[in-house]
Image: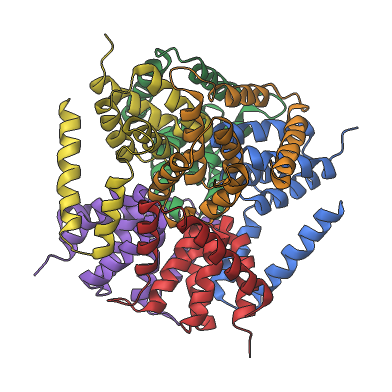
Chain colours: A red, B purple, C yellow, D green, E orange, F blue
């Protein structure tokens, strides 16, 4: 994983730990759900990560997109699958999502270099 | 299909025809893309409809949700798959999506009555 | 309570029951949090309902606004407090929230008739 | 003007009057700005109404779109100008705006019947 | 106040001055309202800052969140009050707000170090 | 053009090239529409860039705002026209757009220094 993705992951985990250290029961429960909904069930893990990625793209959250890109790579999403998922996001969300697509593809290159 | 879904489809098609009759080339091209991105390719049609459904739910568009629910039923999405996709949408999009989940499940009952 | 608010509440509860009957564990947990965060704690119930109302207004969800208006009336929110909370929402969210303010004040009249 | 547009205008004005009767100074000032920004200045009234229409479309507010459509008709916006403005909105805002375009063109027919 | 918050405040004020120097009457009036709605009235200043914070969080604007965090600290918001307000925002706005919560809690530590 | 705007343009073009190199037909068609809708037609290029700018501002996308500011300067938008367009965006979109207005005016100074 590239340095910038390692650093993203480190900072994300450090700040999550800071939030959970507050010991607010509802915030902790929310984080538990946020982990659970992506676990394989009736839908497999790959499909769920693509759902998370497309939702994050149309809502235009770079950190969320970065996280789901990492998870999509771990779940074995192929290049053409990534393209088709992002084409759905672009069509639904419009050109306002393009700056996020630019950054998403730039990171995807780190995760999934072309052969 | 229930009367309300038949009426939804009729009105949607009538108004789409009205838009396309304007003969604006860019709007027509956009509609062409909007059809094409959901066609099976590297990702199958069912996965793409679920992506469209989740995107529509987090962006909170009832007409878009209704359309993708109809298409999900046609693609054979099972009850538990629908639940897991909507659980992702609810978690990403928050309680503000709940009124849309209420209407989505009410329509899903029309499309997919419990055995 | 006016007929339209009684009907709103009846339909909301019927559809919530339909969602919970699906027995999806993550959706059920989310609904539990959604109830818990508005309960009095370090902040009192009235303040929390105003937070919910303003969040719902800037995100422009009529059903959410209606629900929090009912709860604000139950918590004893005064007319001038309602005005000041909605003035914050209008300023943060812009004129795009005005149609929701129109409907909110129309319902507030049902809940809180001027003396 | 068609019956539904007359009714839209009547209800909009009645509810605006209800809001202003609250005598909240900040809400009243906001409404004053909301009138003033569309008045002709360095940009003419027609351009400003198109700006309001496109902003309302990408933010997906039907009441706001309806209001600006009425004003665009009053300012003499031609059919092809309307098409090009809505094509910008559709491209920026994505397919999630299409249900609003459907309703917008349906109302535009009331305001601007084809020759 | 930490260096990064001092720098945030300095830059915010410099750019606000640049906007107001344009002498556009409607923008100036908007800025006047934006100051006025948070002043204590029927609701106290602390409640209003919490409303502004929650609205900013569900709309996902880091600069707005940072500003209201500073003001919340000045108004004497306690740690547990902050947690409960942000739990409302997280529930209403969903996991898409989590990156903003991470940054909010990181700044809150600068403003409100644990005893 | 200032160094930061030259760098913005360079990076934007490099990442657009990376996206288009994917050879996804729907993404390529979307980019074609995104160029076409701003070309002069029934509405002139200046009006269309102002529509794009206001849409980008109410949707709060800094990269999109930066791009349309550059194009507005190229189309000869005058200072007072910029002010009036941004006043519409601020009114429609609310105070949540102010951080974007700060950055927009800061860049406009690079593009359009006061005499």
Q: Nearer the viewer, residue A114 or C38?
A: C38
Image point 27% across, 36% down: which residue? Answer: C67
- Residue B77 is drawn in which quadrant? bottom left
Give the position of the N terminus of chain E as an image quadrant: top right
In the image, is residue E98 above or below residue A70?
above
Q: Is E75 on the left-hand or right-hand side of B95? A: right
Image point 70% across, 69% down: which residue? Answer: F15
In the rendered image, the residue lying farthest to the right is: F115
The location of residue F1, given as percent across then percent down, is 87, 51
In the rendered image, the residue lying farthest to the top is: C115
In the image, is residue F40 above or below residue A83?
above
In the rendered image, the residue lying farthest to the front is: E115
Residue E49 appears in view: yes
Residue C94 appears in view: no
The location of residue E50, given as percent across then percent down, is 48, 35
In the rendered image, the residue lying farthest to the bottom is: A115
The location of residue C12, given as percent across then percent down, is 20, 43
Image point 60% across, 34% down: which residue? Answer: F90
The location of residue E11, given as percent across then percent down, is 75, 40
In the image, is residue D73 above or below residue F47?
above
- Residue F106 is drawn in which quadrant? top right
Give the position of the C terminus of chain E as an image quadrant: top right
Q: Is D82 on the left-hand or right-hand side of F13? A: left
Image point 60% across, 24% down: which residue? Answer: E35
Instruction: Give the total number of marks visible in the rendering.
Output: 0
Q: Nearer the viewer, residue F86 or D70?
A: F86
């Amino acid at each position: 994983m590239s340095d910038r993705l390692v650093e993203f992951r480190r900072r994300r985990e450090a700040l999550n730990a800071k939030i959970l250290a507050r010991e607010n029961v509802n915030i902790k429960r929310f984080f538990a759900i946020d982990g659970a909904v992506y676990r394989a069930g009736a839908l497999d893990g790959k499909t769920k990560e693509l759902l998370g990625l497309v939702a994050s793209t149309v809502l235009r959250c770079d950190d969320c997109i970065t996280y789901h890109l990492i998870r999509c790579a771990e779940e074995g999403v192929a290049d053409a699958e990534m393209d088709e998922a992002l084409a759905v996001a672009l069509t639904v969300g419009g050109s306002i999502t393009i700056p996020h697509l630019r950054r998403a593809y730039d990171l995807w290159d780190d995760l999934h270099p072309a052969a």
